[in-house]
């Protein structure tokens, strides 16, 4: 059987099983146990297991310990197989996801019910650009005392937590970068995107076994629960955690007594000053803020515009195709999208990642098909400004001047250190905001996605490590540097 036929038959078999045995709702999935932030699946027992096959060759495991044992065995095989095999596996994963992007985008969309189908597919296609073994670099030292080498070595088995917002993309991007650096992984996917994540992992594992004879490198908890996440956090044979998600899981990971790379939440502000190119700014805000209905952690969430150019900027947004909501419509949308609980706003998950047409309906408007983003003027206290709302409505706030806009941007980024954007042709303002915001990503005169190579330069990743400081993760992020020193010999000059 050639490789393409093999991949197709594995995919068909896994999808067929998903359809027949996977019909019971997953915890957290629509119709299943609700998955609120911080309590994704543990609120109730997981119930009957929806996917019955637990052949270790699939990489799906109920027990964390069994997953870690298998991942340990597979990692040893990978370590002895060498760089060429790692490279081959990364290319194989990219090929599989490319061949299945349309079908898998639909499967993820149908399961999670958030975001946009076209962007779910695009996010899978972008995995082609995730860096692989070519990113690993050895530093060499040579002098009178001999030679030294700093080698990028694997950690072993990595414990990874993935979000519902990009379930297959995060699993796949992590898989490529972590395997390139010689590791295996035990994943705890978000319960509301767990079926599609398990399906992709199984397909990758089977294809890797068929082509390279290596056991499941991508072990996955099926079903994932808060308990399995906790067990992964604390497992003695997992030396490194890589966590992608919101505030609760970021806090939980950073409390652990082991190394954690945390890709945490954001609330990216945009500042627009008097010197901006307003048409370009409008296009960029629509591109970044509407991507997958604003589910991206880097996506433009709130805009601060210097008062003297506020009306021009609003006109540019209308001209670029965004639909402006009146104050009354914004009020209706705000009432539906947030609930005041005790002392803070809670985002109503029914509207997270939904289409502008769905948001428009609760605001009393009929929004035409083809409109990507809604916007409107609010003041700073509207919850759309401080909350990471993940909806295709972006609030625009008037600022007295650039400094006022900057101070509001800093305040509403909440010190997450994630992403900030500016539209300006004033170098001093661009520099001042970059320094003052101190975010991991800083997009200047383009969409936030430019920082990940979409409409800008740089390589992509679905895990931007923010509070722990590793930035846009790559294979190098998942290595330990080990030095060998040969004293007094091996130097040939
Ligand atoms: P989430 O925090 O609800 O869930 C993320 C993962 O953490 C899930 O697998 C969930 O089951 C698990 N989890 C949640 N609370 C936990 C706890 N207390 N202990 C152990 N595990 C726990 O996030 P989400 O809704 O899936 O994703 C959106 C959030 O993730 C946003 O805040 C977004 O900014 C962030 N995000 C960040 C990046 C990044 O690269 N920095 C990328 C994607 C998403």
Image (cartoon, rainbow, N blue to C red):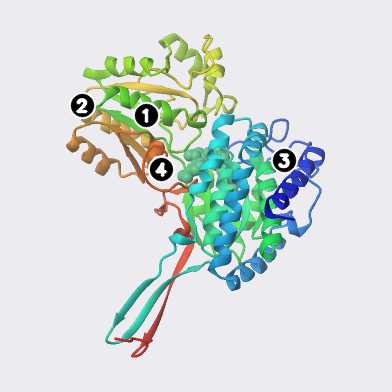
Select label 3 or label 2 by which is in front: 2
Q: Is residue 95 left or right of residue 305?
A: right
**Where does residue 208 sit, x and y in percent of width and height?**
66, 59
Q: CA distance from mark 3 to mark 2?
A: 54 Å
Report the residue at 75% width, 36% height from top.
25
Q: CA distance from mark 4 to mark 3?
A: 41 Å
Q: Quadrant of residue 45?
A: top right
Q: Is residue 333 left or right of residue 44?
A: left
Whether label 1 lies within 8 Å of ligand 1 gets the answer no
Q: Which residue position is annotated with label 3? A: 44
Q: Secondary structure at mark 1?
A: helix
- Mark 2: few, some, or many residues within 10 Å (few <14, many ≥20)? few
**Where does residue 115 sit, x and y in percent of width and height?**
56, 30
| Quarter of the displayed picture in which ligand 1 can be seen | top right
Name the N-terminal-most of marks 3 and 2.
Answer: 3
Viewport quadrant of the C terminus: bottom left
Badge 4 vs badge 1, beta-carbon distance below 8 Å: no
> Which disc, if any, is residue 453?
4
Select label 1 or label 3 by which is in front: 1
Q: Is residue 88 visible?
A: yes
Q: Secondary structure at mark 3?
A: loop
> Which disc, if any, is residue 188?
none
Q: Which residue position is annotated with label 2? A: 275
Q: CA distance from mark 4 to mark 1?
A: 14 Å
């Amino acid at each position: 059987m050639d490789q393409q036929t093999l991949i197709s038959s594995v995919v068909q078999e896994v999808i067929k099983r998903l359809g027949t045995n996977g019909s019971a709702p997953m915890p957290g999935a629509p119709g299943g146990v609700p998955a609120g932030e911080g309590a994704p699946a543990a609120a109730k027992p997981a119930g009957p297991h929806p996917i019955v096959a637990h052949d270790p060759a699939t990489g799906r495991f109920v027990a964390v310990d069994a997953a870690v044992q298998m991942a340990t065995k597979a990692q040893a095989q990978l370590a002895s197989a060498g760089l060429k095999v790692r490279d081959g596996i990364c290319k194989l994963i990219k090929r599989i996801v490319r061949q299945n992007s349309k079908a898998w985008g639909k499967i993820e969309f149908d399961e999670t019910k958030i975001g946009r189908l076209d962007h779910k597919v695009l996010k899978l296609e972008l995995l082609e650009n995730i860096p692989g073994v070519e990113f690993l670099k050895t530093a060499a030292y040579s002098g009178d005392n001999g030679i030294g080498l700093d080698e990028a070595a694997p950690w072993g088995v990595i414990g990874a937590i993935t979000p519902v917002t990009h379930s297959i993309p995060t699993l796949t991007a992590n898989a490529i970068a972590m395997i390139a650096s010689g590791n295996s992984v035990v994943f705890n996917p978000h319960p509301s995107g767990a079926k599609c994540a398990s399906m992709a992992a199984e397909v990758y594992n089977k294809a890797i076994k068929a082509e390279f004879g290596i056991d499941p490198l991508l072990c996955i908890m099926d079903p994932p629960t808060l308990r399995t996440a906790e067990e992964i956090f604390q497992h003695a044979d997992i030396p490194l955690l890589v966590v992608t998600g919101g505030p609760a899981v970021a806090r939980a990971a950073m409390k652990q007594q082991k190394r954690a790379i945390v890709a945490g939440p954001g609330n990216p502000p945009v500042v627009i000053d008097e010197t901006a190119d307003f048409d370009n700014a409008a296009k960029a805000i629509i591109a970044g803020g509407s991507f997958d209905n604003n589910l991206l952690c880097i996506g433009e969430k709130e805009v601060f515009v210097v008062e003297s150019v506020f009306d021009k900027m609003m006109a540019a947004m209308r001209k670029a195709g965004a639909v402006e909501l009146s104050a009354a419509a914004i009020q209706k949308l705000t009432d539906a999208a947030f609930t005041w609980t005790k002392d803070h706003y809670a985002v109503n998950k029914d509207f997270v990642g939904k289409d502008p047409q769905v948001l428009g309906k609760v605001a009393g408007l009929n929004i035409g098909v083809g409109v990507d983003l809604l916007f409107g003027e609010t003041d700073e206290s509207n919850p759309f400004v401080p909350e990471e709302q993940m909806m295709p409505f972006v609030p625009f706030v008037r600022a007295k001047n650039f400094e006022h806009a900057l101070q509001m941007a800093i305040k509403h980024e909440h010190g997450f250190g994630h992403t900030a954007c500016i539209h300006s042709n004033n170098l001093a303002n661009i520099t001042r905001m970059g320094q003052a915001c101190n975010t991991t990503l800083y997009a200047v005169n383009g969409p936030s996605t430019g920082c990940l190579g979409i409409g800008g330069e740089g390589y992509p990743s679905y895990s931007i490590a923010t509070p722990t400081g590793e930035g846009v993760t790559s294979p190098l992020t998942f290595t330990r540097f080990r030095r060998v020193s040969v004293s007094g010999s091996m130097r040939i000059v």
